[in-house]
Image (cartoon, rainbow, N blue to C red):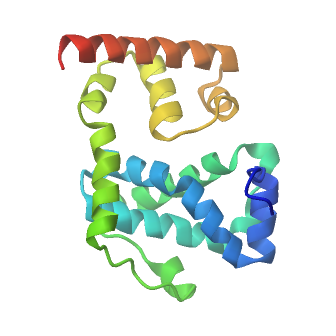
Amino acid sequence: MSRSRRRTDPELASAVVSDPRAFGELYREHEQAVVGYFLHWTRSAELAADLTAETFAPALDSIETFCPDRGELRGWIFGIARHVLARSLDRGRIEDEARRRLGMNPIALDDEMLERIEAVASLDGGALELLSELPPPIRDAVRGRVIEERGYRELAQSLKCSQSVVRQRVHRGLARLRDRLEVNP
């Protein structure tokens, strides 16, 4: 595969099914967004790293279930992430069944990895507090697009509105956040 062109979601999922080494490409493409999602909910670099690993293990294990007709690969991964987070909160611990079944070692966090995770955390610090003050439809659109990095089509489906409405909500929400951040730097 040429590096000049990003694989489409179906191409990438198919490549991972036939060659698990292609999973690294999927991981690199979505890791930062998933880490950011978990940082938002846990406020802990270590927990975010563990939960990220526990998201990608079942993703690798069940990649053949990805259906591009039902949404983007990023949305599918975030569906797994939401499930992992909910299950971990319900049980009071991070599950590692899929990782162990696949023979994957736990992630050992070195200084470089912690710095990368902290960099993701710093991206959303004050803005996340302001995000919670936005009206729910605008907040949900901004969170889905910016923090979870979901596509407009997927967001429109989940928010039950058109893509243009999602785009307007994201634009309005980001403008409001920018204005508030300029007033309260």
- Identify whether 102 is placed above or below 118: below
Q: Which residue is nearer to you in this view: 94 or 174?
A: 174
Question: Can the viewer see residue 41 in this picture?
Answer: no
Q: Residue at x 25, y 13 (%)?
A: 182
Task: Give the side of residue 150 with respect to residue 135, left or right.
Answer: right
Residue 94: quadrant of the picture: bottom left
Q: Which residue is nearer to you in this view: 179 or 85?
A: 179
List x then y, in percent, for residue 120.
35, 48
Q: How many marks?
A: 0
Task: Give the side of residue 4 with respect to residue 94, left or right.
Answer: right
List x then y, in percent, for residue 124.
32, 37
Task: Give the side of residue 86 with respect to residue 133, left or right.
Answer: right
Q: Which residue is nearer to you in this view: 178 or 153?
A: 178
Q: Residue at x 42, y 62 (%)?
A: 87
Q: Residue at x 32, y 45 (%)?
A: 40
- Identify whether 59 is placed above or below 70: below
**Quadrant the N terminus occupies:** bottom right
Q: Which residue is nearer to you in this view: 96 or 104?
A: 104
Question: Can the viewer see residue 150 in this picture?
Answer: yes
Residue lying farthest to the left in this orientation: 184
List x then y, in percent, for residue 134.
35, 17
- Identify whether 133 is placed above or below 115: above
List x then y, in percent, for residue 132.
31, 25
**Quadrant the C terminus occupies:** top left
Q: Residue at x 29, y 19 (%)?
A: 133
